[in-house]
Amino acid sequence: MAISEVELRRDTHTTPTKKNLNDLIRDLGLTKSNAELLTSSLKQWNLLDESVQVADPRKRHQPFCSFFTRQDGLFVCHNVTSLFEAIGIACNQNEWRLFTDSSSRSLKAVLLHNGNKYPSLLLAPSVHLKENYNSINILLDALRYDEYGWEVIGDLKIVAFPMGFQGGLTKCPCYLCLWDSRDTKPHYHRQYWPQRTEFSVGRNNVKWEPLVDPRKVLMPPLHIKLGLLKQFVRSVDKESAAFKYLHDFFPKLSEAKVKAGVFVGPHIKKILECNEFPNKLISKVKAAWDSFVAVVRGFLGNHKIVKLRGAG
Ligand SMILES: [Zn+2]
């Protein structure tokens, strides 16, 4: 039986509910006052379900408030399991990784979904905590890290704190091996350094008791890329056509920065997309560049050609 178009339209016409409105506000990324303005306008035009109140957008965060507490200058989620339950997703610690980052004034911790199916979950925004061992200790303690044991990711500076490393330019900065950063002679020749098997306070730049199992620490792909590119650019002959090209390619970067290989993520993307640059390189350097591109595209990117089989 055919239904007339008018009937169909009337059947499917529903006024948005509180949930529809909340979804829209979140997708638009509206501030609280803008969300309130939108709600009151929609309400005036009779475009909202009767149950929706104008003040609702202001209370959107309320169901989740009870899972956060303020302590030691830190606003932190003290019950991650319940927060997951309230959002409506299973709390499986193997599916998430804990990302910490900081600026000079603040420190924050976010849960990232492995595979990025879900958006990131902010667990501890702080504006007072400094980036140091104590802050990370307080943070992990408040999050009850021991119960969850997430894998941890962050740049090498941040990772050094939960590993209990002394700050600054140390002799043994690596948490995986005993690489000697001051032994410059074999820098490019020696490939094998003994693995770090123990973390004893007072030895090999370990200053405090480690807070996290080193096997739980993930290397951030971006920083691996930045490090490799830095080493590459530093070793390129400064008088060569390739270096001059690189300098002209990033006109906003000072020559000192290009010389020191100080780049950021988007620079890497730009230079990888450039077809002209590899042509300026000479044999050995070109081979090194090709290897770098292969590692970035095949191993560190989102589409890895290396498949890791099983565990171990
Ligand atoms: Zn190492």
Image (cartoon, rainbow, N blue to C red):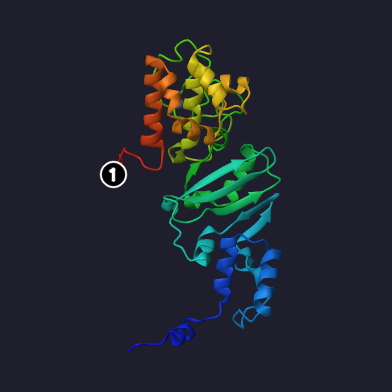
Q: In the picture, which quadrant includes the N terminus?
A: bottom left
Disc 1 residue type? Answer: Gly
At which x and y percent is residue 25? 60, 65
The yes-or-no answer for disc 1 within 8 Å of ligand 1 is no
**Residue pictured at 68% horizontal, 79% vertical:** 44
At which x and y percent is residue 98? 51, 47
**Residue pictured at 50% horizontal, 49% vertical:** 146
Q: Nearer the viewer, residue 202 or 269?
A: 269
Q: Which quadrant of the picture is home to ligand 1?
A: top left
Does 230 sit left or right of 282 as displayed?
Answer: right
Rendered view: 246 above or below 83: above
Rendered view: 269 above or below 14: above
Q: How many marks?
A: 1
- Report crowding for label 1: few under 14, some 14 to 19, many 20 or more residues within 10 A (C-alpha): few
Does 24 sit left or right of 90 as displayed?
Answer: right
Residue sitting at the far left:
309
**Residue pictured at 62% horizontal, 83% vertical:** 50
| Residue 192 visible, this angle | no
Q: Nearer the viewer, residue 259 or 183?
A: 259
Q: In the picture, which quadrant includes the C terminus?
A: top left
The residue to which callout 1 is attached is 310
Q: Nearer the viewer, residue 220 or 175?
A: 220
Q: Nearer the viewer, residue 74 or 286?
A: 286
At which x and y percent is residue 151? 46, 45
| Residue 68 visible, this angle | yes
- Quadrant housing residue 20: bottom right
Rendered view: 242 above or below 135: above
Residue sitting at the far front:
5
Q: Secondary structure at mark 1?
A: loop
